[in-house]
Image (tube, rainbow, N blue to C red):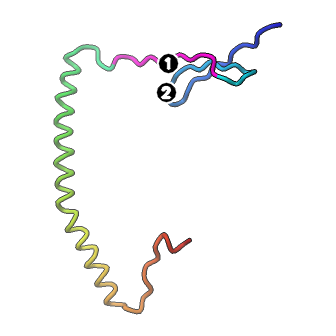
Amino acid sequence: MAKPALITVTCPCCQAELHIDPQTQAVIRHVEHVKPPTFGDIEAAVQQFKGEAGRREEAFRKSVASHKSHQDVLSKKFDEMLRLAKEDPDAPPPIRDIDFD
């Protein structure tokens, strides 16, 4: 009796090669995807590392600036909503997501 051939499938997430037995529907073996080396030499890795430090510092500065102005933005939004509520006190309150249930 001939043994059924294994089905070979490539995982869409990790690119591993899975060999599946069609009768038992179980993974019999797998071959992990081999990633190519990221850098050809150490100098390129050092240059990229130095560049990443500058990008991280810039992202941190932007985050701090955004955090400092966040309170002002919230205050302006609140003042605008309060002004609209005072102009038309008979208007119904805004519909929230929870009100749709």
Observer-nearest of 7 and 1: 1
Number of on-image labels: 2
Position in image of residue 41 (x %, y %): 24, 14
Q: Which residues are magenta?
A: 27-37
> Is 19 placed left or right of 79 in the picture?
right
Circle 2/circle 1 CB separation < 8 Å: yes
Position in image of residue 67 (x %, y %): 20, 58
Q: Which residue is at 17% across, 43% downward?
A: 58
Q: Which residue is at 49% across, 27% downward?
A: 14
Observer-nearest of 69 and 31: 31
In the picture, the disc for residue 32 is 1
Position in image of residue 91 (x %, y %): 42, 88
Q: Is residue 50 above or below residue 55?
A: above
> Is 38 placed left or right of 76 in the picture?
right
Where the C terminus falls, by quadrant? Answer: bottom right
Q: Pointer 1: residues within 10 angstroms few (<14), some, or many (20+)? A: few
Position in image of residue 22 (x %, y %): 73, 21
Q: Which residue is at 46% across, 73% downward?
A: 96
Residue 2 position by quadrant: top right
* Label 2: element kind: loop
Q: Amino acid at mark 1?
A: Glu
Q: Amino acid at mark 2?
A: Cys
In the picture, the disc for residue 14 is 2
Q: Is residue 95 above or below residue 61?
A: below
Asked whether 33 falls inside the magenta stretch, the response is yes
